[in-house]
Image: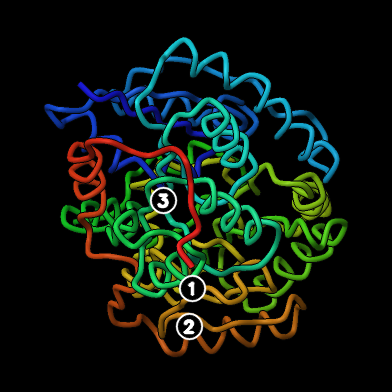
């Protein structure tokens, strides 16, 4: 049995790798090891660990590596703390391959730890272009990784241009699209009645048009988060539609965004809004299918949104350069621009499916490739 260790550091990590975890666990030649780290084990970010265990996965280890503060300094220190703690876990579990996701700081710690320990690294969602520090992390991880699982043809081509051997680059699609395809297949009837028992704020009538807001800090614009989320919330208020608002992730600047949300509520401006720290993946996908518009800077608007056809207003620079479908309108991070874009999207209505990031079978493809690997040379060589 080949042991595949997956490190999950956040709610975004989990949705980005869940279908591959399921396929690895089901594969007769593979053994899944799950390590939870960073915000995935903290209540303040929605206790993703409980969702993972409720989905039936065994958790083999937990790593506390998130330093309080969510500043550039603490983000760098958190990466270092992960690099201190993860080698011990890998030494105990003895994985044959470490599978890491995307472009977050915990991805960097995971990759460096495995690479220094001569453990082959498999990387999903590499080769893409975006804004913020994620861009640098993503391409750095590509140069450490031994097996590449890009989500789109454009990303595959970019990985090869970075000097990675073509036979190590496997175009599989995005595992997040697998979840979308599965949820949409069985998505009938209204959302559960007790949805608004969680979170805080008003109960909304989801049979009527509503906005979904998901906005995270931009690490290269640290200090601007409070102003940016305030502009977004004011734009939503000006449009007049009720809104479901999600809490930001744990990147540097998270506290600025959270402060903006708290001040908004303290000023009594949230009478038509409901706030959640976290939502189950299937609930979020079903909300994306029903919302009049997804507003913010989450990659879910770009990736899942294209597949679902969700009208999206993408704000600011966080997703700059990322491949996008017809469903996305880009907006500057100011109230007037965001409000105008929301009105345009709600007038346009739902878009057709645009499967840029896969067809719903990425997880199985990843498991099959990992099972079929014989010998992996951990010594990297640039091929140009």
Tell me how far mark 3 sits from mark 2, CA to CA: 33 Å
Q: Residue 346 carries which label?
A: 2
**Residue marked by disc 3:** 124
Q: Residues within 10 Å of mark 2 (few under 14, many from 20)?
A: some
Comparing marks 1 and 3, which lies closer to the viewer?
Answer: 3
Question: Does residue 84 lie above or below 329 as drawn?
Answer: above
The spot of residue 255 in percent (x, y) is 79, 44
Quadrant in the picture for residue 85 = top right
Quadrant in the picture for residue 80 = top right
The spot of residue 34 in percent (x, y) is 40, 24
For the point 29% across and 51% down, the residue is 179
For the point 76% across and 40% down, the residue is 75
Q: How crowded is mark 1: few (under 14 residues within 10 Å), some or many (20 or more)?
A: many
Tell me if label 2 and label 1 are in contact, CB under 8 Å.
Answer: yes
Of labels 3 and 2, earlier in sequence is 3
For the point 40% across and 16% down, the residue is 94
Q: Which of 118 and 177 is in front in this view?
A: 118
Please, what secondary structure does the residue beneath circle 3 have?
Answer: strand
Q: Nearer the viewer, residue 297 or 360?
A: 360
The spot of residue 279 in percent (x, y) is 47, 43
**Residue marked by disc 1:** 293
Please, what secondary structure does the residue beneath circle 1 have?
Answer: strand
The spot of residue 238 in percent (x, y) is 69, 77
Comparing marks 3 and 2, which lies closer to the viewer?
Answer: 3
């Amino acid at each position: 049995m080949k042991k595949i260790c997956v490190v999950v550091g956040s709610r975004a990590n989990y949705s980005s790798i869940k279908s591959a975890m399921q396929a690895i666990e089901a594969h007769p030649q593979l053994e899944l090891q799950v390590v939870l780290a960073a915000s995935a084990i903290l209540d303040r970010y929605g206790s993703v660990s409980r969702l993972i265990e409720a989905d039936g996965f065994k958790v083999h280890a937990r790593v506390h590596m998130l330093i309080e503060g969510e500043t550039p300094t603490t983000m760098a220190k958190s990466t270092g703390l992960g690099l201190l703690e993860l080698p011990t876990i890998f030494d105990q579990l003895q994985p044959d391959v470490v599978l890491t996701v995307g472009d977050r700081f915990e991805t960097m710690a995971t990759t460096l730890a495995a690479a220094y320990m001569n453990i082959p690294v498999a990387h999903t969602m590499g080769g893409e272009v975006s804004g913020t520090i994620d861009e640098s992390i993503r391409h750095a991880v590509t140069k450490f990784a031994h097996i590449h699982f890009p989500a789109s043809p454009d990303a595959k081509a970019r990985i090869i241009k970075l000097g990675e051997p073509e036979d190590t680059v496997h175009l599989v699609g995005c595992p997040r699209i697998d979840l979308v395809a599965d949820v949409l297949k069985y998505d009938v009837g209204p959302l559960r009645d007790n949805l608004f028992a969680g979170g805080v704020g008003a109960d909304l009538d989801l049979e009527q048009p509503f906005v979904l807001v998901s906005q995270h800090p931009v690490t290269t614009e640290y200090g601007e988060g409070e102003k940016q989320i305030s502009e977004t919330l004011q734009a939503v208020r000006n449009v007049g539609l009720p809104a479901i608002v999600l809490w930001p992730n744990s990147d540097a600047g998270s506290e600025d965004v959270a402060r903006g949300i708290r001040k908004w509520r303290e000023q009594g401006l949230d009478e038509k809004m409901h706030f959640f720290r976290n939502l189950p993946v299937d609930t979020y996908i079903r909300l994306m299918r029903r919302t009049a518009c997804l507003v913010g800077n989450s990659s879910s608007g770009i990736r899942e949104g294209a597949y679902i056809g969700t009208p999206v207003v993408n704000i600011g620079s966080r997703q700059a350069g990322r491949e996008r479908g017809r469903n996305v309108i880009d907006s500057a991070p100011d109230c007037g621009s965001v409000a105008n874009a929301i009105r345009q999207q709600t007038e346009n209505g739902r878009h057709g499916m645009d499967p840029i990031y896969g067809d719903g079978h990425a997880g199985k493809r990843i498991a099959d490739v990992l099972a079929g690997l014989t010998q992996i040379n951990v010594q990297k060589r640039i091929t140009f």
